[in-house]
Image (cartoon, helix red, strand yellow):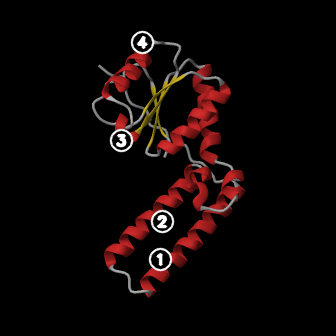
Amino acid sequence: ELPSKIEQVLWCELSAPQAALYRSVQEQTERALLDLEAGGASENALRLATLTQLLRLRQVCCDPRLLGSSADASTETADSAKLEAFRELLAEALDDGHRLLVFSQFTSLLALLRQELDQQEVPYAYLDGSMTTRQRQAEVDRFQSERDLPVFLLSLKAGGTGLNLTGADTVVHFD
């Protein structure tokens, strides 16, 4: 009885500062991995280091601020192409009366999105893995019942199981 699902992929070209940061992190990553290999690191250590470095590159693509203090000061000034695309998507959705579920693997990214929504004075519900079962259910119930609550931010891990959210018509997988 559900309407047909429509999938839309939004491609985001990295801004110049974001692309420069990406290249810088990529170069640092490659050097670190080569140093590990040259130092005789085990295959498991190399695999773990590779996955960690790929995660850092994904974070740069989502929002450079996710790197935090582990990167240079340019993370504070580098733009986020995905955040800009989200702003546009949000504005369109709000204008058209849509309600959004916004998922991210990174709770730190959800914190940035919360700041964005607060700045725009857009009400939202929020759910992550640190919440108790009662808090989770309260947020779900609030989103389902309050039609003037257009956005629900959810961590992918916490929001991906055991929830029945019928109050939204748009789902955004931010990362």
The residue singled out by tag 3 in the image is: 157
Query: Could you tell me which secondary element the residue under label 4 belongs to?
Result: helix
Mark 2: which amino acid?
Gln
Q: Mark 2 to mark 4: distance in Å? A: 42 Å
Mark 3: which amino acid?
Lys
* Quadrant occupied by the N terminus: top left
Query: Is there CB contact under 8 Å for labels 2 and 1?
Result: yes
The residue singled out by tag 2 in the image is: 53
Q: Mark 1 to mark 4: distance in Å? A: 50 Å
Q: Mark 2 to mark 3: distance in Å? A: 21 Å
Nearer to the camera, 156 or 94: 156
Q: Mark 3 to mark 4: distance in Å? A: 23 Å
Mark 4: which amino acid?
Ser
Which of the two labelled residues, at mark 3 and mark 4, occupies the earlier sequence position? 4
Residue placed at 54% from the left, 78% from the top?
A: 31
Nearer to the camera, 117 or 7: 117
Q: Mark 1 to mark 3: distance in Å? A: 29 Å
As displayed, is residue 79 above or below residue 162?
Answer: below
The residue singled out by tag 4 in the image is: 145
Identify the disc placed on residue 33: 1
Which of the two labelled residues, at mark 2 and mark 3, occupies the earlier sequence position? 2
